[in-house]
Image: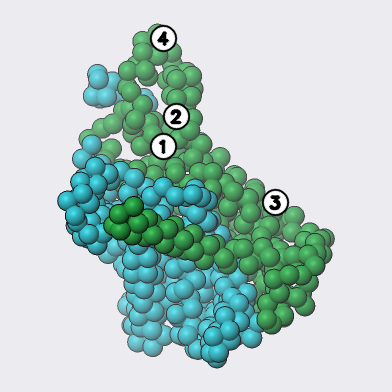
Chain colours: A green, B cyan
Amino acid sequence: MSPAKSRRKNLNAVRIVAAWAVGVAMFFPIFWMLLTSFKTELDAFSMPPRFAFRPTLENYEQILARANYMHYAWNSVATAGGATILGMLVAVPAAYAFAFHPTKRTRGTLLWMLSTKMLPGVGVLVPIYLIARDTNLLDSRTALVVIFALTNLPIMVWMIYTYFRDVPMDIVEAARMDGASTWEALRHVLLPVSRGGLASTALLCLILSWNESFWSLNLTTSNAAPLTALVASFSSPEGLFWAKLSAVSTLACAPILVLGWLSQKQLVRGLTFGAVK
Amino acid sequence: MSARKSKTHPERLLAQPAILMLFAWMIVPLLMTVYFSTQYFNLLYPKKSSFVGFENFVYFFTYPSFWTSVVNTILLVGSVLAITVVCGVLISVLVDQHFPGQGIVRMLLISPFFVMPTVAALAWKNLLMNPVSGFFAWVAQLFGLTPVNWFADWPLLSVIFVVAWEWLPFAILIFVTALQSMDREQKEAAQMDGARTWDVFWHLTVPHLRRPIAVVVMVEAIFLLNVFAEIFVTTNGGPGDATTNVPFVVYTQALLEFDVGAASAGGLVAVVLANIVAVFLIRLIGKTLTER
C-alpha cells in the first residue's frame, strides 16, 4: 500500500470516529435523562454520577399515579391532534386552489401567508389573552387547538402546495374530463398520489404543536395544560426531583422523537418552505 | 393548461377559509396591539383606561431592562446562529460520507430538535449544568477544575448553549440534505487534481451551501427571536435582567404587571425586529418560487 493511500485510510478512520463522537455527544443529554429516569432520587443526585445502579421503575409509577400524567398527556394529544386535523382540513383545499387554479395574486398570497408565520407571539399576546379571557377560552383546549392550527397553517399550506405542484396537471384534468367533480378528483386522484406528502405535513404539524411552549404556557393553568406545562411545573425549586423530572420528560418526548426519526427527510421541505429539498 | 388560466373557477374559493383565518389571526390582534399601545390600560384598574399617545413607548424606551432585553435578544440570536451555522456545516460535512452506522449517527444528531423546549432547558440546567451534582461538574472535577456554576455565573451563555443544542440539529438536517445534491464528480475530479481537503471545502462545499445557510439563518432567526420557554423555566429572566429577552419583558409587563399598554408597545417592538428578518426571508423564498 502506498503511503498516500494508507494516510487516506487513517484519515477516514479518524473521520468515522469523529462522526460517531459528535453524534454521541449531541445525543448525550437525552441519554442521560433516560438513564436518570431509572434511578432512585438518591442515585440521581450522587456525585460522582452512577453509571451502574439498580434500575427502578418507581419514578414512572409515581408520575403516572400521582402527577396526574394522563390528564396532561391527553391534553397534549387532544390539542396537537386537534390542531393537525383542523389545519389539514383548511390547508389541503387552499393548497389545491393555489396549485391547480393559480391567479396573478397566488404568489403574493402565499408569501403573505408565510409572513404571518413571522409575526412574533408576543406581538399579539395581549389581545389574544384578552380575547380568550372574555370568551371564556382561557385554559381551554379549544383555544390551543385553534392557535396551534393557525400558527402552523402557513407551513402546512406551503408544504402541501409544493407536493401538489409536483403532481402532473394532466391526471387531475383527465379525471375532470371523465366527469368527476372537484371533490371526486381531489379524493380519488390527488389525495392518493400525494399521500406521502400529506402524511409528512400532518406529522410536522403534530410535532410542532406537541412541542409548542409559548401559548401553551401563557394561556393554560391546569384544565387544558399540556405536557410542556407539566414539565415546566418541575422548575420550581421545591419540586426538584431529578429522577421524576427525567421520567416525565422521557414520557413526554419519546413519542415525538420516534415520529421525528421516521419523518426526518420530509421535515426539511416543510421547515424551509420548500427552499431546500 | 386551460384550467390554470381561465378566470372564474369556484375552486379558487377553496383558499378562502385559510386566507380569512390567517387574516383574522394576524390583522385583528395586531390592530388591537397597536390600539392598546396608545392607551393607559392596566388590568388591575380596568376602569381607568385612557389615551396616552406615545407614553407607553416612552416608558419602554426609558426603561433600563428594555434595552438590556434588546441587547440580550441580539446576543442570543447572534450567538446561536453563529454556533449552529459553523458547527452545522462542519458536522454535516463530517457525516456526508458512507461509513458504518451512518444512519444511526444521523438519528442521534437530529434528536435534540424533537425535544420540547421545557424538557431541554430543565434537563440541561439540572442534570448537566448543576454545579454540585451535574454531569459537567463531574467532568470538570475529573480534570481537576472547579465546577462552573453555569446558570448563576454565566446565565445568558447557559441559555445560549441550551438553545444552540436545540437548533444545531435543524442546521445539520438542512445542510446534510443540501450536500446530497452536491456534484460528487466535480468534487472527486478536484481531489484527483490534487486539491487539498481544505480547498475542496472552501471552494466547492461552502459555495454550494450558500443558499441553505441563508435559509437556516433566517428560519432560525424567526424562531430564536421568540425564545421564551427556555428562559421561563430556567432563570425567569434573571439574575436581575441578565437573561431577559424581548418576548420575556413583554410577558412580564402583560401577565405579571398586567400593564396592557406597555406590553403592547413592547410587543410592537418585537414585531418590528421580526419584520427586519422577515423581509429578507420572504424575498429569498419568493425568488425560489419564481425560479421553477
Q: Quadrant of residue B223?
A: bottom left
Image marks 3 and 2: residues in contact by CB distance under 8 Å: no
**Mark 3 or mark 2, earlier in chain:** 3
**Mark 2 or mark 1, earlier in chain:** 1
The crowding category of the residue bearing disc 3, from other C-alpha atoms within 10 Å (few below 14, some 14 to 19, many at least 20), is: some
Q: Which residue is mark 1?
A: A160
Real-space CA distance between mark 4 and mark 2, rounded to the nearest whole angstrom: 21 Å
The crowding category of the residue bearing disc 1, from other C-alpha atoms within 10 Å (few below 14, some 14 to 19, many at least 20), is: many
Q: Which residue is mark 2?
A: A194
Q: Which amino acid lies under the numbered mark 2 shown in the image of this protein?
A: Ser
Q: Nearer the viewer, mark 4 or mark 2?
A: 2
Residue at the image position 35 percent from the left and 80 percent from the top? B71
Image marks 2 and 1: residues in contact by CB distance under 8 Å: yes
Q: Is residue B156 above or below residue A176?
A: below
Real-space CA distance between mark 1 and mark 4, rounded to the nearest whole angstrom: 25 Å
The crowding category of the residue bearing disc 4, from other C-alpha atoms within 10 Å (few below 14, some 14 to 19, many at least 20), is: few
Real-space CA distance between mark 3 and mark 2, rounded to the nearest whole angstrom: 30 Å
Q: Which residue is mark 3?
A: A74
Q: Which mark is residue A179?
A: 4
**Mark 1 or mark 3, earlier in chain:** 3
Real-space CA distance between mark 2 and mark 1, rounded to the nearest whole angstrom: 9 Å
Q: Please state which of residues B39 and B208 is positioned toward the viewer in this rendering.
A: B208
Q: Secondary structure at mark 2?
A: loop
Real-space CA distance between mark 3 and mark 4, rounded to the nearest whole angstrom: 44 Å
Percent position (x, y) of residue B216? 34, 57
Q: Is residue B35 above or below residue B100?
A: below
Q: Nearer the viewer, mark 1 or mark 4?
A: 1
Image marks 4 and 2: residues in contact by CB distance under 8 Å: no
